Amino acid sequence: MTYCVRNFLSRRQSVLRNSQCIVALQLTVRHSSTSSSQEDVDQIRTLLQLCADRYYISPGDANSELFRHGMSCSYGPLGMELRRNLLEQWWRSVTRSTAQVFGIKTLSSRMDTETDRHDQLRLVEYENFKQILEEKDLSKDLLIQKLQMLLQRSPTVKTNFLQGALEQFVPTLELVNRKLPFGLAEAGLCFQPSDGSGCLGEVTRTSLVWFCSARTSSQWLDYWTRQRLKWWRKFALSPSDFSSCDIPVEELEEAATRGVRIVYSFNGGQEPLETLWNRGNNELLQTHKGARSKLQCRDGRKSIPHVISVTANMDRGVMAFLSNSLQQLKKGDSKQKLQQRKVLKLHPVFAPVKVALDISRGATVELRQVCEGLLQEFMDAKISAWPGYLETLPTSVEQLNAKYDEMGVLFSVVVSENTLESGLLQVRSRDTSIKEIMHVSEVKKFLSRYISAADNV
């Protein structure tokens, strides 16, 4: 089991009662109910319920709370696809925005006997820990000694990607012929202590560590701030909900001279999505034990590079884009009753499902064959499709449209008897609700062009 090192000695008795702390993670609510209006609370509840109903996250209050507070949760099929799309676009934006950004992969846990910092998180086997606690007639000093030895033998777990990038600096330096600037990018799961609980949770993080000269470090921090804010806003339905702000001096990390946060305005307050730091070169020197000669680079003069770190929480990013894209629209029906229509207007590049395939009443073997042919075409073109034609329960057109709107499906296609006769089928847009007639041979090309055009805006 995984425990926070700082809580071992002070919580001896409580550890046994809370051995399943990761499963039953206790989250500290950052914004009290008194600070949010009832409308804000209802909107958050609506979004979380929709995410559970439409396959973005697994059902359950505990899972919803993890997701709500920016922790990695149990994702459903659509949530996994959305997160994958988000990570893919982040990676593209970072590695293609400027030259000399390389991807790396570092270990999630490792044995580290050279350092024994009090703030390190370590992976401890529960049975070994329990065995020490259950030993009888142990003095306090001996108990502390045994626990310290256990911790020293246990591997550290990754809480960020910075240290791995600093260690990879020297090998990469030869790759770039000792020329600045260049960057190292990484993405994956990290552990994060839950505030006050002593237990760990997982977070999907992305990291860019940028090495540059001291004289250009301030300009590079500004550059990456502009690039990252532009990226978040590019995919937003309401770009103004994303903003950046300087981190106050009293909140700066020890190694940093300046910091910037990119935040999203959730209902109830702003939450950080991405954090940028100008970290100087002290951490780089410490990592390589002050060996200045092997760290020196060429940038007009020989110097030790400064470090700009860019770190994002992609689980909170998924939540931000879902929140930003949810629209609740009111419309009247034939009986003059107002009904609420929920639409998840995710950016076309992020939408987990691009098109849904359905057949009209009176389904035949031939209609299903047309759908299967279209599905194969979409798969070949890497267009994600939902095989609605396999649904066996009778569902009205209105119910289908409502379902697909809540899933964020860009277009729904209905194949009918008319398709067999003329090759024409009906295509409905999520964003406009407009239904168009299109030839079956044109659908794939239309979708590809639509998604490509949205990505290039």
Image: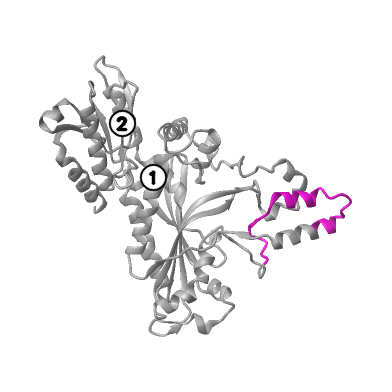
> Which residue is labeled 2 in the image?
388
The quadrant holding residue 78 is top left
Residue type at tag 2: Gly
- State the image coordinates of residue 454 (x, y, percent, origin top left): 24, 49
Please report whichever mark, 1 or 2, sits nearer to the chain's N-terminal start: 1
- Image check: 442 left or right of 4? left
Q: Extreme top residue here? A: 335
Residue sitting at x 54%, y 33%: 61
- State the image coordinates of residue 266 (x, y, percent, origin top left): 43, 42
The quadrant holding residue 91 is bottom left
Residue type at tag 1: Glu
Is 117 covered by the magenta stretch? yes
Residue sitting at x 23%, y 38%: 373
Nearer the viewer's eye, disc 1 or disc 2?
Answer: 2
- State the image coordinates of residue 374 (x, y, percent, origin top left): 23, 38
Q: Extreme right residue here? A: 137
Q: Which residues are magenta?
A: 116-144
Residues 70 and 73: in front is 73
Query: Crowdedness of circle 1 by 10 Å Cα count: few (<14), some, many (20+)?
Result: some
> Which mark identifies residue 352?
none
Residues 253 and 3: in front is 3
> Which residue is labeled 1 in the image?
81
